Image: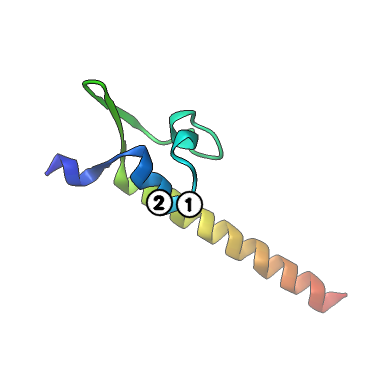
């Protein structure tokens, strides 16, 4: 059951479309993700990765809305 909630860096990369080493190095906004050590393996909490993906989507939507508003005003 715990395996369902923990994912590899590669799986996280597929969710957010980043290279897996980005997660390992804690770059590009992934600093806050929890790294869970299981022996030699390091895994991420799936719900945190999904929340980050949703936050990135929401931020981009806000940027698009601002850009459209500025274009209409000009």
> What residue sits 36% from the left and 33% below the top?
34
**As drawn, is 62 to the left or to the right of 32?**
right
Across and down, in percent, residue 55 comes to: 49, 54
Q: Using the image, determine if residue 31 lies above or below residue 73.
A: above
Please tell me how crowded label 1 is: few (under 14), some (14-19), or many (20+) other residues with Cα within 10 Å: few
> What residue sits 60% from the left and 60% below the top?
60
**As drawn, is 4 to the left or to the right of 41?**
left
Residue projecting furthest to the left: 1
> What residue sits 45% from the left and 57% below the top?
54
Residue 67 picture quarter: bottom right
Q: Dots 1 and 2: beta carbons under 8 Å?
A: yes
- The residue pinned by badge 1 equals 17
Pick the front one: 27 or 14: 14
The N terminus is located in which quarter? top left
Across and down, in percent, residue 71 comes to: 81, 74
Cα separation, mark 1 vs mark 2, equals 5 Å
The C terminus is located in which quarter? bottom right
Residue 37 picture quarter: top left
User: What SS does tag 2 mark?
Assistant: helix
- The residue pinned by badge 2 equals 14
Residue 51 at least partly seen: no
User: What SS does tag 1 mark?
Assistant: loop
Tell me how the rendering is colored.
Answer: rainbow
**As drawn, is 16 to the left or to the right of 29?**
left
Q: Using the image, determine if residue 70 lies above or below residue 57.
A: below
> What residue sits 80% from the left and 70% below the top?
70
Residue projecting furthest to the top: 39
């Amino acid at each position: 059951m715990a395996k369902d909630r923990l994912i590899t860096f590669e799986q996280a990369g597929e969710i957010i479309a980043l290279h897996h080493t980005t997660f390992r190095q804690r770059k590009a906004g992934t600093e806050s993700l929890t790294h869970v050590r299981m022996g030699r393996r390091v895994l991420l909490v799936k719900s945190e990765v999904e929340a980050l993906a949703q936050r990135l989507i929401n931020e981009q939507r806000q940027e698009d809305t601002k850009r459209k508003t500025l274009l209409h005003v000009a």
